[in-house]
Image (tube, rainbow, N blue to C red):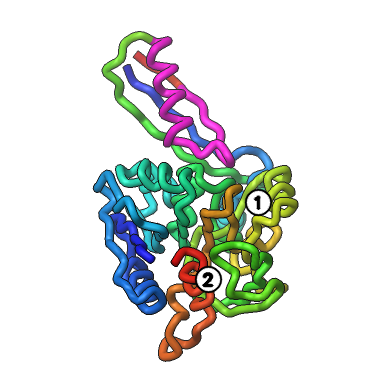
Amino acid sequence: MKSAVVVFPDSNCDRDAAIALEQTTGKKPVMVWHGDSQLPNDVSLIVLPGGFSYGDYLRSGAMAAHSRIMSDVKDKADKGVAVLGICNGFQVLTEAGLLPGVLIRNINLKYVCRPVGLTVEESQSSFTRSYRKGEVIRIPVAHGEGNYFADDETLDRLESENRIAFRYAEGENPNGSARNIAGILSEKRNVLGMMPHPERVCDPALGGTDGHGLFQSLVETLS
Amino acid sequence: MKARIFVTLKNGVLDPQGKAIGHALNNLGFPSVGKVRQGKIIDIELSQNDEVAARSELENMCEKLLANTVIESYEIELTK
């Protein structure tokens, strides 16, 4: 399985994502600079990593969403290539219109950096099939703007189409997200955006392996 | 031609920063302060001199980048 990690100026989780991908797929991902115009054609997974692309200028993810590489990311997403946006990557995906809604400032205005409980809401996707529906996993969040917002109509639609992949477990919503949403799928279910960082919990030496299932799911689906 | 763009949060969108500003003003001895909403001003210099064309160009800029219309609305002010 060939994967790629897009590197924006101020991405800071790109190497963590690369290590997690290499551990699971057995192959180093291709690191693609945001100013490039093309991803490798045979890539089956594109990761938009966490960080503060373009210093979060204007709005988090807004500048990155218009960077050169994004038109190829959109083309490939349209063709069904799996795209995973983690944290800042999720913000970029919403700004680019690949996922609905927007991530606004955390309700208490604080940057939150700690492990949180997540309920797996949907195991019928190439990102989550290694998990059981309803299972609670612990994955760290690290963000100041992770408060998921969308109008009621959009939220209802996400729910009725089973596109909410993860919710914060009861009493653990760290940012005020609508309906406790932590991660959502696109209409075609090949794009996932999530605020928590699964790549940070893929090695027992780093405090847990609950994130491994996500990468394992992708390997099982895409290999 | 010069343009000033006002980007503000739509009604009903939570504004934790505005809220914090309101609290701070109350604490600083301004008890009359009620609800506070904050936003952005973006000043743009344009080489375009036709007002209609400038306005349509600016609207395009707002829709594409300057505002996220899921949560924000914008107003355009043009001066010669």
Q: Find disc 2 in the rendering and name its residue.
A: A217
Q: Give the x, y percent position of residue A221.
A: 51, 66
Q: Chain of mark 2?
A: A
User: Would you say A221 lies left or right of A24 here?
Assistant: right
Question: Callout 1: few (<14), some (14-19), or many (20+) C-alpha neighbours within 10 Å?
Answer: few
Asked which secondary structure carries label 1, the reply is loop
Q: Find disc 1 in the rendering and name its residue.
A: B31
The residue at 37%/59% (across/down) is A52
> Looking at the picture, which amino acid does disc 2 mark?
Ser
Q: Give the x, y percent position of residue A153.
A: 72, 43
Q: Is residue B78 above or below residue A82?
A: above
User: Would you say A171 lies left or right of A70 here?
Assistant: right
The answer to which of B67 and A87 lies nearer the viewer is A87
The answer to which of B74 and A140 lies nearer the viewer is A140
The stretch in magenta equals B51-76
Residue A8 got which mark? none
The residue at 58%/74% (across/down) is A130
Q: Nearer the viewer, mark 2 or mark 1?
A: 2
